Image: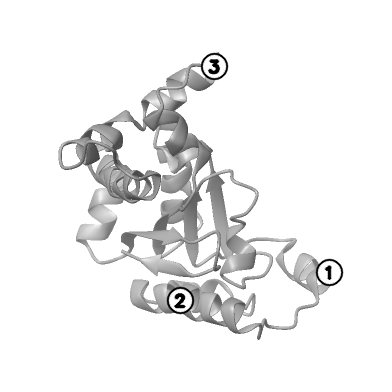
Amino acid sequence: MTDQNEHTVAHMTPDEALELLKSGNRRFLEKKLNQRDLLEQVARTGSGQHPFAVVLGCIDSRVPPELIFDQGIGDILSVRVAGNIVNEDILGSLEFATKVAGAKLVLVLGHTNCGAVKGAKDQVELGILTALVKKIQPAVSAVRDVSDDPEVDQIAEINVKLSIEDIKSKSLNLFKLEEQGEIIIIGAMYDVNTGHVKFL
């Protein structure tokens, strides 16, 4: 897209922002990607940005948000951390994305076959990574309550939902923006085998 300006995004509804991501993933799956002049987009966004969405996703190299949603430079903000977990810095980034940059949608994007989630399930310990993986343990525990041997993808989906709960409970700014209808906070799962995004 990258045709939006400050006025366009300011008048966009959260549902319209969501539809832009859904239609982008459809184009990605159908191999009908929008043709873009990326350097022209660089020039157009040099003086400012007006993203319509922010995506909190995993660092996994197979899940680049701009590509799987067929978006251009300046369209979405991307926050990436192993296991798409939430901490104070990430909450601050999401608040910047919405309150300052004007994004209308916060998407927490998990994915299938997630190494961080598998590490949490297997209780892997590896230096500083151990502390990060422990943040995914609540999802492991939640799934283990109903299954003795939960699938990694089940845990990943619950982890997305718990991350959304964290966002809403730990950031009063984001909670209020959603309550006022200025943004929506939703989750999704990306299938690394097919490229399909399932919105939760």
* Amino acid type of the residue tagged 2 in the rendering: Lys
Disc number at residue 156?
none
Q: Secondary structure at mark 3?
A: loop
Which quarter of the figure is the C terminus placed in? bottom left
Q: Is residue 16 visible?
A: yes
How far apart are the two marked residues, 2 and 1, measured between alpha carbons?
A: 25 Å
Q: Residue at x 31, y 65 (%)?
A: 182
How far apart are the two marked residues, 2 and 3, measured between alpha carbons?
A: 37 Å
Closer to the observer: label 1 or label 3?
Answer: 3
Disc number at residue 39?
1
Give above or below for 188 relative to 140: below
- Left or right of 83 in this view: 5: right
Say which residue label 3 marks: 126
Which quarter of the figure is the N terminus placed in? bottom right
How far apart are the two marked residues, 1 and 3, measured between alpha carbons?
A: 41 Å
**Foreground residue among 73 and 95:** 73
Q: Is residue 11 visible?
A: no
First in sequence: mark 2 vs mark 3:
2
Q: Measuring from the top left, give residue 132's x and y in whole percent.
A: 45, 25
* Amino acid type of the residue tagged 1 in the rendering: Leu
Q: Residue at x 63, y 80 (%)?
A: 3
Q: Residue at x 43, y 37 (%)?
A: 117
**Foreground residue among 58 and 12:** 58
**Foreground residue among 59 and 117:** 117
First in sequence: mark 1 vs mark 3:
1
Say which residue label 2 marks: 22
Q: Residue at x 44, y 19 (%)?
A: 131
- Left or right of 51 in this view: 140: left
Give above or below for 15 relative to 142: below
- Left or right of 174 in this view: 142: left
Q: Measuring from the top left, give residue 123's x and y in whole percent.
A: 40, 22
